[in-house]
Amino acid sequence: MNRLFAAACFTALISWLGCQPSSTPRNPDTILDMKRATDYHSYSRPQEAVTTHLNWQAKVDFDRKQIVATATYDLDVDADAQRVMLDIRDLTIHEVRVDGEMVEFELGPNQPFIGQPLSIPIQGHHKQISIDYTTSQDAAAFLWVDGDKPFLFTQSQAILARTWIPCQDSPGIRFTYSADVEVRSDLMALMSAVNPTTKADDGRYHFEMNQPIPSYLLALAVGDVEFRSVGEHTGVYATPDLIEAAAFEFAEMEDMLSAAESLYGTYAWERYDLLVLPAAFPFGGMENPRLTFATPTIIAGDRSLVSLVAHELAHSWSGNLVTNATWDDFWLNEGFTVYFEQRIMESVYGREISEMLSTLSYQGLVDEVDAIMDVNPNDTHLRLHLKDRDPDDGMTAIAYDKGYFFLRLIEETVGREVFDAFLKDYFTSHAFSVMHTDQFLSYLEEHLLNTEELRQTVQVQAWVDGPGLPDNCPQVSSSRIERVDAALQGWVNGSVVTSALPWNDWMYQERYRFLSNIPDDTPASRMAELDASWDINTTGNNEILFAWLEQCIRSKHEPAYDRLRTFLVHVGRRKFLTPLYAAMIESNLADMAHSIYTEARPNYHSVSIGTIDAMLDWKSVNQP
Ligand code: BES
Ligand code: ZN
């Protein structure tokens, strides 16, 4: 610890001397913009003081499952400022210093998912604060995976950064960072920063992120990983058992990066690497700058699931460069990213593939809009209403796919060339700043939808603040998908026998479409026919396996139950868990759901546990 503190003091001294590493020049409006941000998911008061640089000194303790750290922030302080407010959740604060002097800090009441305000007294002339703290065993951002070679990863989005670093945890506030992290010497530490490619003998790693980022992009992973380059600016990190497969699966990352740059301008983060996480990772991917975190479930052996990489890469512009100001503006991150993802996929793999993907997302969107409309129609607006709610509730197909179809409508209205030029200018002129929905809409009307006729055609208001899917939603069609639908219809009504289905000629998207559209009431005997012909339980493609298992539950095809259990115990990706547990409940298999969940729950990350606990009413069932 002492050494850590000494290092912190040293760094403080260096930055006091003005020797900070050079950083990306801030857009002159950025600090002003940050000060304007009001975000009801954060206690920070940017009008008084904003954090501009973080120096993080940390020691990772796998035995205690905790991190002991010092966070030192440079501040931009208003002349009348009286305090700087940070967000924390489940952190133990030991000591706080302002410009090196110990001060009395205040902690406010603890609120569910929001946590507590940490209030630090300052005055207009103060420059820096330092916080010594320890994380808790159940810090919600962390997952500690046990084993000979244990693994730790963080997931900060949306508001979990505050569970491992005290911070102004609002997407509208950006800061650069540097870090010194000490880990077990047989493990490598990686962050959303300039990363090592080999292990350090002494387990000490230094990191720099010289471009200002919002707190939700703070990320750390520690594990027995290796690095493989796959291109000039791209590479993969994975555990030794997966590195070979990962290098093959993601070999086309450099092509995606070039495609993205030719669409919307220079990549701002120098390198784009991908880290394959343990299967318990609750998401498919997370766009941590310079280092996407990804689930191993996209390693299919045939590169069929790489659109996820296109998605996370696209966030390097939409999200990481131009950032949603609050979680109500989440569609500005995700809708733009899905649009951009499709464009990268089209450019690298062709329109046939990208249209199949759009067709699948259209179906997912229509289903989800229907489901949400029954519960709360306001949740189908692009602009969300997350006040007093967990921002995680906003992670539905609305922000993603309604956002995508809105942008596609604009593209189809003004023409691709014009829209591309608009988007490129949008990313360039707002780089490293934040965006509110209103601000985007004014920009859109000023620069693109500048005639009454165009505005009439697009109906911005209906999309952004209206329910459901407006009538002018673009139509997608894919002849390959239409042929699958016809084959399925034939198979269901008996005119096409199982052996006549062209399974082996189908690509992943076609197989997925077939399996996910099998009618719910299909008898188990028919699933057994498919099982006998295609042996889907052994597929290496987890999307196909997932669609198959869901239908096996609904059809009560018992021979698949063992595979279902091992899948759910091993994989923690929420997108797969939610429908599978829901299918069990809806199919009167609640006992099986509880039995599997009892075994699987200790392996899951808090994000997935939160969702599945609520779904299975776990707490009340398991309370003594
Ligand atoms: N940024 C998201 C993940 C996220 C969103 C985490 C909100 C926490 C809160 C990431 O880019 C994402 O969208 N991941 C998707 C994959 C994508 C291909 C749609 C996922 O994990 O399913
Ligand atoms: Zn995303």
Image (cartoon, rainbow, N blue to C red):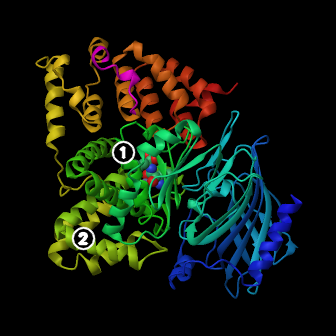
Q: In which quadrant will I find the C terminus?
A: top right
Residue stretch in magenta: 531-541
Q: In which quadrant will I find the N terminus?
A: bottom right
Mark 1 = which residue?
372
Front one among 111 and 312:
312
Q: Position of residue 551 (x, y in %)?
A: 34, 24
- Residue at image location 61% in from the left, 54% down from the top: 160
Q: Mark 2 and 1 residues: CB-CB less than 8 Å, in contact?
A: no
Mark-to-mark CA distance, 2 and 1: 30 Å
Q: Position of residue 72 (x, y in %)?
A: 74, 69
Mark linked to residue 419:
2
Q: Amino acid at mark 2?
A: Phe
- Residue at image location 34% in from the left, 42% down from the top: 374
The image quadrant that residue 492 belongs to is: top left
Q: Is residue 284 magenta?
A: no
Q: Amino acid at mark 1?
A: Ile
Q: Secondary structure at mark 2?
A: helix
